[in-house]
Image (cartoon, rainbow, N blue to C red):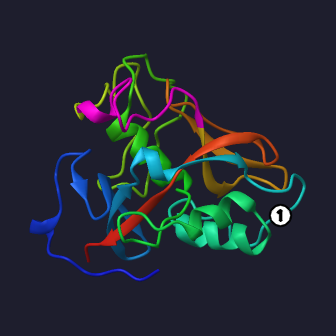
Amino acid sequence: MTAVAATSTLIPTEPGTPFEGGFFAGRIRVGAAEYALIVAPKAEGELEGAWGKRGERVDGADNWNDGHANTLAMAAAGSKIAKQALALTINGFADWHIPSRDELELIYRHLKPTTDDNYTYRSGENPSALPPTHAYTETSPAQTSAEAFRNDGAEAMEEAWYWSSTQYSPYTAWYQYFDDGDQNNVGKDSEGRVRVVRKFLIN
């Protein structure tokens, strides 16, 4: 992935702020590098489909924080939805991908659309987030303060589950619900949603 380093003064502090082709969703670490995570606009950046072939392990799609690497591996293995994600050009940027498990969690934590209580059994633990986060409580995270991402807002995530690009087993992959934040896994041949993201290198 091509990325441009930036000084921290250029990076938004409020989730939902327009930034680099989409909307700022928080900071995440991949290896030794720190990135700003950017969520695509809903109109251009939402896809639906199966993750891939059930029963087939995809080498290179086990990353919890590097969704771009996962998506490349998925596409190489024949995943239609991964190929669609990689083919997108949105607002002049062509490096969109399916978010990893930890990238997807960051979106829920900072851009939660609902006022529903959160699922509290281990969902929300994110060692890749900056700063790292612990499991949800019933009330934290609360509904996002970004109006466009609240229920019925133009950019709001649907109250449904979304695919991550992180493989759980040869048969299933991780997903996250955007009503209560539940993180779990489901058959790769299930039909689910994707909201693509890109990353901007901070340092």
Residue closest to the far top = 116
Looking at the image, is 164 positioned above or below residue 57?
above
Judged left or right of residue 1, residue 170 is: right
Residue highlighted by disc 1 = 57
Judged left or right of residue 144, residue 104 is: right
Looking at the image, is 158 positioned above or below residue 50?
above
Q: Quadrant of residue 7 in the image?
A: bottom left
Does the rendering let one see residue 101? yes
Crowding at dot 1, Cα within 10 Å, few <14 / some 14-19 / many 20+, comes out as: some
Judged left or right of residue 61, residue 123 is: left
Q: The C terminus appears in which quarter of the rendering?
A: bottom left
Q: Residue at x 35, y 34 (%)?
A: 154
Principal secondary structure, stretch drawn in magenta: loop
Where residue 149 appears, as percent x and y from the top left, is 33, 34
* Amino acid found under the numbered disc labelled 1: Arg
Task: Give the magenta part as a residue range.
Answer: 147-161
Judged left or right of residue 17, residue 121 is: right
Q: Does the magenta stretch include residue 148?
A: yes
Q: Which residue is drawn at 45% across and 35% down?
A: 157
Where residue 52 appears, as percent x and y from the top left, is 79, 56
Residue closest to the far right = 55
Where residue 9 appears, as percent x and y from the top left, is 9, 67
Q: Which residue is drawn at 55% across and 51% down?
A: 101
Where disc 1 sits, the SS reads loop
Q: Which residue is drawn at 32% across and 40% down?
A: 110
Residue closest to the far left = 9
Does the rendering let one see residue 62? no
Q: Does the magenta stretch include residue 195?
A: no
Looking at the image, is 175 positioned above or below residue 57?
above
